[in-house]
Image: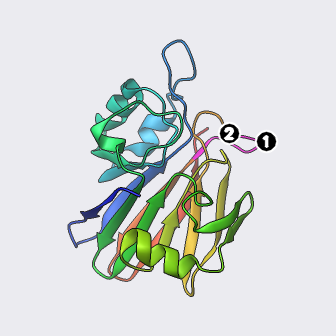
Amino acid sequence: MAGSVWRMKGDGANIAVLADCHIHEGGPQFPEALFPRLQGSDLIVVLGDMGEKAGLDRLEEIAPVLGVRGQDDVDDMRTRREVLLLEDGPYHIGCVFDAVAAGLAVSSDPFVAAPDAAEVSRRLFGHEVDVLLHAGTHKPEEAKFGRRGSALNPGSAVLPADGAKASFLRLKVMADGCFGQIVWVA
């Protein structure tokens, strides 16, 4: 898999994580209630299936956008990779669209880590990750990942599935920890 590393400033970061929005001309659009909730983000990470470039451009009006490619993404430099590693001090945050296809999970809905997830993580990201960000289900979820980590799925701010509410993830990375919170859009 082709990936890259993004190193954060080292003094903490406020990251908004979105996925599965499928923004297309004449199709689904971001709800206006989303944009005030994204304010204050240092970075917006997208985990695939964002749709057309116009959606990424709209997000980039708020903060820099970086992410991974899903199945419904146009070719764009911001999302050209299949895996992404975010680093801030001692924290390693791995990003993929489909954790099952990447070999990190045996199930995405609900998330179940693969028995060899630590080895796959080292191969994909160069490290075991403290947090795995993944998508593809359109439903928010937090699950155990590795010895002390979490697998977090932000759900979808545009097209939530199976009765889930529209959502995204706020990830705060600070010296004393890495904290994720699902944010409801409406």
Q: CA distance from mark 2 to mark 1?
A: 7 Å
**Residue 93 placed where, x, y %?**
41, 69
Residue 21 in sight in this render: yes
**Quarter holding the C terminus?**
top right
Q: Do the CB atoms of the residues marked 2 and 1 lie less than 8 Å apart?
A: yes
Left or right: where does residue 175 sit relative to residue 49?
left
Neighbourhood count class around disc 1 (C-alpha, 10 Å): few under 14, some 14–19, many 20 upward: few
Residue for badge 2: 160
Residue for badge 1: 163
**Quarter holding the N terminus?**
bottom left
Q: Main secondary structure of the magenta part?
A: loop
**Residue 105 placed where, x, y %?**
64, 67
Kindly identify the residue that appears in the image at 51 percent across and 67 percent down.
132
Q: Mark 1: which amino acid?
A: Gly
Residue 129 in sight in this render: no
**Residue 85 placed where, x, y %?**
36, 65
Q: Secondary structure at mark 2?
A: loop
| Residue situated furthest right in the rendering | 162
Kindly identify the residue that appears in the image at 27 percent across and 79 percent down.
89
Left or right: where does residue 106 sit relative to residue 183?
right
Kindly identify the residue that appears in the image at 31 percent across and 64 percent down.
13
Q: Mark 2: which amino acid?
A: Pro
- 38, above or below 24, in the image: below
- 58, above or below 163, in the image: above
**Residue 9 placed where, x, y %?**
20, 67
- 139, above or below 26, in the image: below
Magenta range is: 161-167
Disc on res. 6? none
Of 106 and 57, nearer the camera is 106
